[in-house]
Image (cartoon, rainbow, N blue to C red):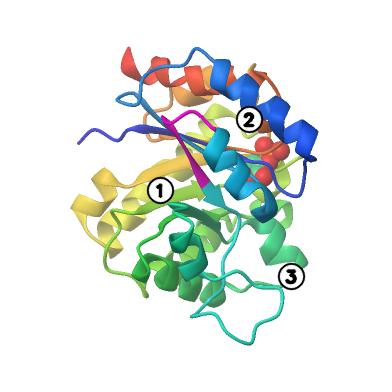
Amino acid sequence: MARKFFVGGNWKCNGTTEEVKKIVSTLNAGDVPSQDVVEVVISPPFVFLPVVKSSLRSDFHVAAQNCWIKKGGAYTGEISAEMLVNLEIPWVILGHSERRSLLGESSEFVGDKVAYALSQGLNVIACIGETLEQREAGSTMAVVAAQTKAIAERITDWTKVVLAYEPVWAIGTGKVATPAQAQEVHFELRKWLQANVSPQVSASTRIIYGGSVSGGNCKELAAQPDLDGFLVGGASLKPEFIDIIKSAEVKKSA
Ligand code: PEP
C-alpha cells in the first residue's frame, strides 16, 4: 500500500512578522515535487497561523503545534480543536517531546488529546520518542510502544494520523539518528501496529522521522523502507527545507 511521503515543518516558538514573510516567500518559490508525491504541512506558532495559511501556496497545508484536550471554555491560554477547525486549520502536532518534558504531558494526556482532535475532524501528527537514558538502557522500543499504545487505546480511525518518531536526543541537537537506527525503530513500530492494531493500519500509517534532519542527511534517511517522511524543526526555518521536501523523490525512484 502506497504511503505518500510527508514533510512537516515545526517552527516551534520562532518568528516575527518579517521573518514569517521571508520564510513563506522562500516556500512559495520552492521548486518541489507535486502533491501526488509529497504532502507538506507547515506549523507556525498559533499567532501566525492565519497569515501563513492565507499567504502560503495552496499545495502546502498548515498545522497548529498543540490544541486543548476537550471542548473550549474556561481554560485560559488554551486553543481548542474547534477553533482550529473554525479557522480551517487541517492539522495539529500533538505530544511533541518538548511539551512532554517541559510541560509534563503524559502519554495518557497526549492520547486523550489525539482522540479529541480526531473527533473534531483534525488530522494529527502524533509525536513519540525515547530519551538518551532510555536508549542507553535498551528500552527504546518499550518506551515508544507505550506511547503509541496510549494513543491506540483511545482511537479507532488511523487514517488521519501520522506517527512521528522523534528520538529526544536527536531533537535540536545536531545529533541525527543514523538511517539504520531510524529504520530499526520504524520497522518495530510497524510490527507493533500490525500486532496491536491491524495489518491494514500497519501498512498504511505513515511513520515519519524527526531529529536534526537537514538538507545534507535527508536523502539517506528518506531511502529507508519504513520511513515515510520527516518532521523538521530548525531546518524548516531555512531554505534547506526545500531540499528536505525534494527528498521525497528518493522514494519515488526506489
Ligand atoms: C522537532 O522540533 O520536531 C524537531 C525534530 O526539531 P529539529 O529538526 O530541530 O531537531
Q: Is mark 2 within 8 Å of ligand 1?
A: yes
Return the residue at label 3: 103
Residue 242 position within the rendered picture, expressed as x and y whole percent measured from the top left = 57, 19
Q: Is mark 3 within 8 Å of ligand 1?
A: no
Asked if residue 56 is positioned above or below residue 218 in the image, the reply reads below
Instruction: Name the residue rendered at 65%, 19% in the picture.
Output: 240
Q: Looking at the picture, tell me which residue is in the foreground, 89 or 232.
A: 89
Q: Is residue 232 visible to us here?
A: yes
Return the residue at label 2: 213
Residue 122 position within the rendered picture, expressed as x and y whole percent measured from the top left = 40, 59
Q: Residues within 10 Å of mark 1 (few under 14, many from 20)?
A: some
Q: The N terminus appears in which quarter of the rendering?
A: top left
Mark toward the start of the polypeptide (1 vs 3): 3
Residue 99 position within the rendered picture, expressed as x and y whole percent measured from the top left = 69, 63
Q: Is residue 59 magenta?
A: yes
Q: Is residue 119 left or right of residue 74?
A: left
Q: Is residue 84 left or right of residue 172?
A: left
Q: Residue 196 falls in which quadrant of the image?
A: bottom left
Type of amino acid at the residue the image marks with label 3: Leu
Per the model, the C-alpha gap separating discs 3 and 2 is 24 Å
Return the residue at label 1: 188
Q: Is residue 164 left or right of residue 11?
A: left
Q: Looking at the picture, tell me which residue is in the foreground, 208 or 63.
A: 63
Region rendered in magenta = 56-62
Type of amino acid at the residue the image marks with label 1: Glu
Q: Is residue 217 visible to us here?
A: no
